[in-house]
Image (spheres, rainbow, N blue to C red):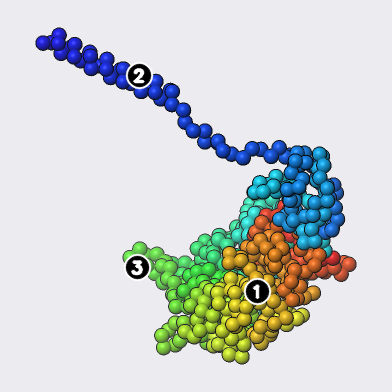
Amino acid sequence: MRCMQKYYNALLLSGLCMMLLGSCKNNREKVYDDPYAGGKPALGIRMSTDFPAPRLGDPGSTVTFKATGLMPYRSDLQFFINSERAEVVSVDSSGIKVKVPENASTGIGYVTIGDRIVFGPVFRVNGKLTSDNTFRALVGSNGYISKVLPLADGRMILVGSFSNYENKGSVKPLNRIILISKDGELDRSLQIGDGVGGYLNTITTLPNGKMVIGGGFSTYDIHLGEVNNITVLNSNGTIDSMVVRTFLDRDTVPAFNGGVDGNIQRAFVHGNTITATGNFNFYLQRVYGKSDYRAKRDSLIVDSVRIKNLVRFFADGSLDSSFNYNFLLHRSNDGPNGPVNDAFMQEDGKLIIAGRFTRYNNESVNYIVRLNTDGTIDRAFKVGTGADNYISSITYNEATRRFMLSGNFTSFDGKVQNGLVMLNEDGSVDPSFKGAAKNSDDNYAYAKQLSNGMVLVSGYFKNYGGVHRGHFMLLDHTGALARGYNTTGDLDGIVNGVLETRNFAGQLQLLITGGFGKFDEQPAGNITRLLLK
């Protein structure tokens, strides 16, 4: 029996081996489909990476790109310079000659044949807006620049989310606030110490020369966790401090004893008060000198008051309860029911706020409203039904006495306005400015009318009025692309601020800041200066 069992086991094992061998043989013989079969044959075109001849030129001029393999497709191909179609003048075995399009801007030249593209080198288009080569910041910052504060002597203070500038913060970081010369060189006379632990959105000055900074931060220099998103600095950059008696000892703390529990976007000074806007829910103030009896140590107590997205402080940080406050409820009135993206304070102290809110103190305002100095709605500001979607920025031109709004709206006060609208000083729509239609995913993040009447616009868009423009453009006073001023290449980010100056020849200079890594195909670390010819 044992012999028979061994025989059957051997037979079974032999059968299994035969099955496995057969399976392996079948796998070896099976042929799978070629995953690359059916692909289109290579065109055989090679665009040279050599500079075109000439490497820069005016719209309407002719330029030659070196290329081989174009002859079989000479009747079918199309040529583009930065997405604008160019007229083909001639094609031969060594390259292609084209006429620079009227609306061309600096960018890559490329050939298309059907749905296939062959890329070539960059061609630079001459224009009336150029980089100012007297600006000496070649590297710029390593993070977003949110605001520029110009000083009387021409120097500027920059704030944002950076920790380095011109590679001079590698050993000791330049955290969020720096001083630069009028031509962009770092000035180390600002005594920021360890700077800001967080980020800054805004900076302004008090009548006594001290500075107010706001953003999202709790630390400034050695004052760790002692700030609530806003504080006051001395003119030399040190924090304005005071000595307080605690329960057990004495301590040096920020003199501005006030803040909020969220992000501050803008801050304004009028008289002895500071008004801040942003996205927050509570006013905060620290109470010193109280003890934790069980632990026998000083206890940090923070008083809070319900305040939404809009608050006014006195110069020492205490809450100004004469501004939009409800004494019966011991909190502010409802205020804006959403974040305030941007704001503008007039010389008389009235404040225009704009953003992602549709109501103010439970009244419909549709993303924009002007407030009296006590925080009530100023009904003389004639914005009517307002916008139909959020507003990103509001700027004012003192020369033309006009406001520019940008955002994601398609109408304003019932009139078609595609993300851009110019308002008269009383808030009514200026019908002389009419922006072009925009795509649904276009977003105009910033717009400002310059002293010469042109309007600088930045945001996330690729076309304007049928012309390729990448994230940056200059419009004339009617809303059309300014002829000769839109030849610069695509911006790889956005501009959120512009400061106008004049050079020795009287030419207009534009210092632009924001979040971008290059301008006109040249490196630019979130800051550069342009020259209008």
Q: Is residue 192 above or below residue 411?
A: above
Q: Is residue 43 above or below residue 217?
A: above
Asked if one can make out residue 182 in the rendered structure from this viewpoint, the answer is: no
Q: Earlier in the sequence, mark 3 or mark 1?
A: 3
Which residue is at the far left?
1
Q: Amino acid at mark 1?
A: Leu
Please state the horizontal and vertical placement of residue 328, each as a whole percent of the image: 41, 88
Q: Is residue 11 above or below residue 230?
A: above
Q: Dividing the image into 4 quarters, which one contains the C terminus?
A: bottom right
Q: Where, by quadrant of the figure, is residue 275 drawn?
A: bottom right
Q: Amino acid at mark 3?
A: Tyr
Circle nearer the viewer, 3 or 1: 1
Residue for point 28% across, 19% down: 16
Q: Circle 2 — which element? A: helix
Residue designated by label 3: 293
Q: Where, by quadrant of the figure, is residue 372 drawn?
A: bottom right
Residue for point 70% across, 82% down: 431
Q: CA distance from mark 2 to mark 3?
A: 83 Å
- Quick check: 225 left or right of 349? left
Please state the horizontal and vertical placement of residue 242, each as a whole percent of the image: 56, 71
Residue designated by label 1: 420
Circle nearer the viewer, 1 or 2: 2
- Quick check: 39 left or right of 27? right
Q: Amino acid at mark 2?
A: Leu
Q: Dividing the image into 4 quarters, which one contains the N terminus?
A: top left
Circle nearer the viewer, 2 or 3: 2
- Front one among 224 and 103: 103
Q: Circle 3 — which element? A: loop
Q: Earlier in the sequence, mark 1 or mark 2?
A: 2
Please state the horizontal and vertical placement of residue 302, each as a whole percent of the image: 44, 72
Residue designated by label 2: 21
